[in-house]
Image (tube, grey):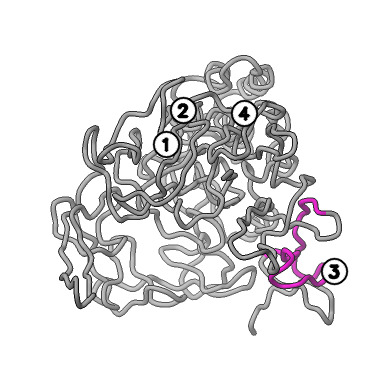
């Protein structure tokens, strides 16, 4: 049973993939890209992590270093792309840059080198990646900020510029591993539409379109509509766990509709996913069972740091509990935290291998008896990521093709998928498919849709643009964060007055 990239989110500076959500995901990544793990800060529902920094900038490295890095990465067909970029992109510790433009120029070759090393793209796609945002077709790397109108929002003064963490971000892009604790990642460095140098500048009560615009609050807007910034409610106040009103501050979580302080290390915790402070998990928590024959009360846990080498990691959680530099070996008896494996080592899980390697040949089947994971039918072997034209086995769960590629079932080689101009299927499963038949549609990356007339990935249309109505449940929606009005045949964002 082959699988390709699961949540095809166009994430700026890398695609964050939640490996723990594997059981609920129909198309998991063939090899985990650069992902930061841990409790995420408040996120805009329309993309990923939104954050802010503080302080002032200093002198930037020279332009020549960026030019040299670009040339070095282009020539990296037989050398490690990340090592090349590290050698050419400047000093080991980067000062903060002097402008957003300088950051983008320095970051681009590092982003692309990291994308190759972490299995997001293939080496043959480096030249395309180095074109950068707005020019490259690799939405899986560069996202779709143009559709989100981030530059317009910044020009309108709803996002301010703070360069104080740009040097830290450049260092992480240059030498950071592919698996990181989210606390170690400057907000906006590896994900999100807002960049690491963007900070909110809209006060509560003022108009907004995105959460990232609001100072110490969030935006009530839906889709591409306009709302207003709402302040988070203080500790002890009434709150909601869903909806656009009554969200708690970052130091609290909503328990029984009351904002309650998140627990610190060593403190007792309930099973709520935000009960513990960022970077901690609720160890030992057991949920209540109200089955009359197996009745069991809830058992609280203790807020604890991620587990080290040798610790048991079998839980009912949807995410892993090992340190970011380790992996949970779900093929072991019982599952335990282990150091990542080297080239040619046998592997039994998606993220088992060290940076630059994938667990090629891994096949999953059934349910793991220790927790909410699929079972291992056939172990794989840690091997370098493949590239376009390389031979692969479509039936493998991990084919070795990068996240930007799929193992073609006809040619049995890796080829580009999900990007503009790539062949595609509707993201919907055919309504008339036989019962029990697997559905593995080849969809498109974020900001794109599969045009039913051409069956190639095509840029989604913006509000007010002319569109052709599609069949709900059969064809992809051509409009970005909206729908095609069947009467007027224009994209309608569905904003309420």
Task: Give the distance between the C-alpha atoms of the residues marked 3 and 2, in whole angstroms.
Answer: 45 Å
Tell me if residue 473 is in the magenta stretch: yes
Query: Sequence-wise, which precedes: disc 3 or disc 2?
Result: 2
The reply to whether discs 3 and 4 touch (Cβ–Cβ < 8 Å) is no
Q: Which residues are magenta?
A: 455-480
Q: Position of residue 254 (x, y in %)?
A: 30, 71
**Local crowd size for mark 2, using a 10 Å CA cut-off: few (<14), some (14–19), many (≥20):** many
User: Which of marks 2 and 1 precedes in the sequence?
Assistant: 1
Tag on residue 179? 1
Callout 3 secondary element: loop
State the mark number for residue 109: 4
Q: Which residue is mark 3?
A: 466
- What's the distance in space between the residues labelled 1 and 3, CA to CA? 42 Å
State the SS at label 2: loop
Q: Are marks 1 and 3 in contact (CB under 8 Å)?
A: no
Identify whether 308 is placed above or below 86.
below
- Outermost residue on the front side: it is 435
């Amino acid at each position: 049973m082959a699988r390709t990239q699961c949540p095809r989110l166009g994430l700026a500076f890398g695609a964050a993939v939640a490996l723990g959500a594997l059981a609920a995901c129909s198309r998991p990544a063939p090899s985990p890209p650069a992902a930061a793990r841990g409790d995420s800060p408040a996120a805009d529902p329309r993309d990923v992590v939104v954050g802010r920094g503080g302080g002032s900038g200093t002198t930037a490295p020279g332009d020549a270093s960026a030019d040299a890095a670009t040339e070095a990465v282009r020539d990296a067909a037989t050398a490690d792309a990340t090592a090349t970029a590290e050698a050419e992109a400047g000093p080991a510790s980067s000062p903060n840059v002097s402008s957003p433009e300088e950051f983008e120029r320095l970051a681009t070759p590092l982003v692309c080198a990291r994308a190759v090393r972490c299995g997001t793209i293939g080496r043959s796609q480096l030249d395309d990646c180095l074109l950068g945002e707005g020019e490259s077709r690799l939405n899986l790397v560069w996202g779709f900020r143009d559709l989100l109108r981030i530059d317009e929002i910044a020009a309108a003064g709803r996002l301010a510029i703070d360069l104080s963490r740009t040097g830290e971000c450049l260092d992480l892009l240059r030498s950071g591993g592919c698996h990181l604790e989210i606390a170690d990642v400057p907000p906006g460095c590896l994900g999100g539409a807002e960049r690491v140098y963007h900070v909110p500048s809209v006060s509560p009560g003022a108009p907004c379109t995105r959460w990232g615009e609001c100072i110490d609050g969030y935006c009530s807007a839906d889709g591409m509509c306009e709302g207003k910034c709402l302040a988070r409610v203080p500790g002890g106040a009434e709150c909601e766990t869903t909806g656009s009103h009554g969200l708690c501050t970052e130091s609290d979580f909503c328990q029984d509709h009351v904002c309650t302080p998140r627990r610190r290390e060593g403190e007792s915790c309930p099973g709520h996913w935000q009960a513990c402070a960022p970077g901690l998990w609720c160890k030992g928590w057991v949920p209540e069972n109200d089955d009359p024959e197996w009745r069991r009360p809830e058992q609280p846990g203790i807020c604890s740091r991620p587990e080290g080498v040798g610790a048991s990691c079998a839980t009912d959680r949807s995410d892993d509990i090992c340190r970011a530099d380790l992996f949970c070996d779900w093929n072991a008896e019982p599952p335990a935290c282990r150091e990542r494996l080297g080239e040619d080592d046998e592997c039994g899980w998606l993220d088992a291998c060290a940076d630059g390697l994938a667990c090629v040949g891994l096949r999953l089947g059934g349910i793991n008896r220790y927790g909410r994971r699929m079972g291992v039918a056939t172990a794989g072997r840690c091997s370098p990521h493949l590239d376009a034209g390389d031979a692969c086995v479509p039936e493998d769960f991990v084919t070795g093709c990068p996240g930007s590629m799929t193992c073609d079932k006809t040619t049995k080689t890796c080829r580009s998928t999900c990007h503009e101009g790539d062949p595609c299927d509707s993201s919907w499963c055919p309504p008339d498919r036989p019962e029990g038949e697997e559905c593995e549609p080849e969809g498109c990356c974020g900001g794109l849709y599969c045009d039913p007339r051409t069956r190639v990935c095509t840029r989604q249309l913006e509000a007010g643009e002319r569109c052709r109505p599609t069949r709900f449940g059969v064809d992809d929606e051509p409009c970005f964060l909206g729908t095609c009005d069947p009467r007027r045949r224009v994209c309608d964002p569905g904003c309420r007055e």
